[in-house]
Amino acid sequence: MEYGRAASYEWEEGVSVVDSPAGRLQALFEGHRLTPTQRRIAHSMVRRAADVPFLSSVELAELAGVSQPSVTRFAVALGFDGYPALRRHLREVAPAEQTTETGSYNEYQQAVEAEIENLRHLAELLADPRAVQKAGRLLAASRPLPVLGLRAAASQAYGFSYFAAKVHPDVRLLDEGGTMIQDRIEAAVRAGASALLCFALPRHPREVVDTLAFAKQAGLTVVTVADSAFAPVAKVSDLLLPAAVGTGLAFDTACAPMLLGRVLLEAMCDDLPEAQARLEEFDARAAARGLFVE
């Protein structure tokens, strides 16, 4: 899978890009093989899709953490004469007004506002549910279902696995790296696994990329929730579902990936006929044990 194709969030063949600022940017990047620096610029543009048409090349470079010449080269790589031509094109397809001014917010409020915007972008992507529905079918059919998440993504994998285990008969959490992880994937394949779900968040550990490559070689279909369609895991994923993280605080925030994980749980439940019965059985056992405080 080329990064350019991943940039169009190739959720499923025949699924069109959502008609939104972020979606139109994704479509613009489709088919272009981008360098790591260019993917970083593209990712920053998608995260600030409504603002980008009004940013100078210097401002975009600062936003992406790259040099101004890198922004110019990026525009040329997309087929434009330079960044001014790219910006004129973006203004033609962008909304007429910029997003609400947030200059009066303090840094904590700005972080919350950024996460709200990430959730809006996720809602736009979910306007066409076929990609998530396809992922739900793949995950429901895999027995067992390995769920991978290392370092920053470990909590996302744990949260998904905790709830998935209530409806799926065999969920196997892979939240610790090391030499045993490939053994555990091989064991899952021998037991009948057909798919693997991965949560991948920055900074992306090299071990996650290597592990997904190994899983694909072992015959598993890799479904990945990542912070961007330009993430390093794109090239080793069969189905990549992007959900941006917030970067305004000292440590990234991951509300959108967490919510996308819950959406995937819902889609998986839709393809598990026994899901409701399993939930009711769990509730009955929990009540008998006095597990929760009413």
Image (spheres, rainbow, N blue to C red):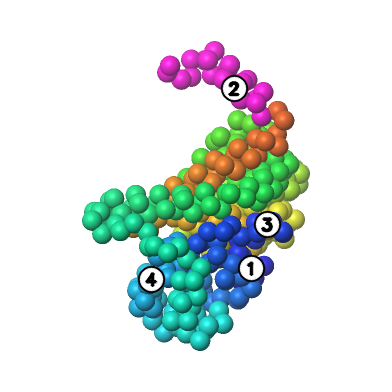
Asked if disc 4 and disc 3 are in contact, CB closer than 8 Å, the reply is: no
- Element on which disc 4 rests: helix
- Dot 1 or dot 3: first in sequence order is 1
Q: CA distance from mark 4 to mark 1?
A: 26 Å
Asked if the stretch drawn in magenta spans residue 274, the answer is no
Q: Predominant secondary structure in magenta?
A: helix
User: If the image is split into quadrants, where does the C terminus sit?
Assistant: top left
Q: Are marks 4 and 2 in contact (CB under 8 Å)?
A: no
Mark 1 or mark 2, which is nearer the start of the sequence? 1
Pointer 2 or 3: first along the chain = 3
Question: Mark 2 to mark 1: distance in Å?
Answer: 42 Å
Q: Is residue 290 magenta?
A: yes
Q: Amino acid at mark 1?
A: Arg
Residue pointed to by mark 2: 282
Quarter of the image that includes the N terminus: bottom right
Disc on res. 15: 3
Q: Residue at x 29, y 57 (%)?
A: 102
CA gap between label 4 and label 3 equals: 29 Å
Q: Nearer the viewer, residue 32 or 292?
A: 32
Residue drawn at 65 percent across, 51 percent down: 131
Q: Which-is-in-front pick, marks 4 and 1?
A: 4
Nearest to viewer (mark 1 / mark 3): 3
- The span shown in magenta is 275-294
Measuring from the top left, give residue 70's x and y in whole percent. 44, 81
Give the alpha-carbon distance from disc 4 to disc 2, as whole Å: 53 Å
Mark 3: which secondary structure? loop
> Label 1 belongs to which residue?
5
Q: Crowding near pointer 1: few (<14 within 10 Å), some, many (20+)?
A: many
> Considering depth in this image, is 24 or 241 the residue closer to the camera?
24
Label 4 with label 1: CB-CB less than 8 Å: no
Crowd band around label 4 with a 10 angstrom C-alpha radius: few (<14), some (14–19), many (20+) = some
Q: Disc 4 marks which amino acid?
A: Phe
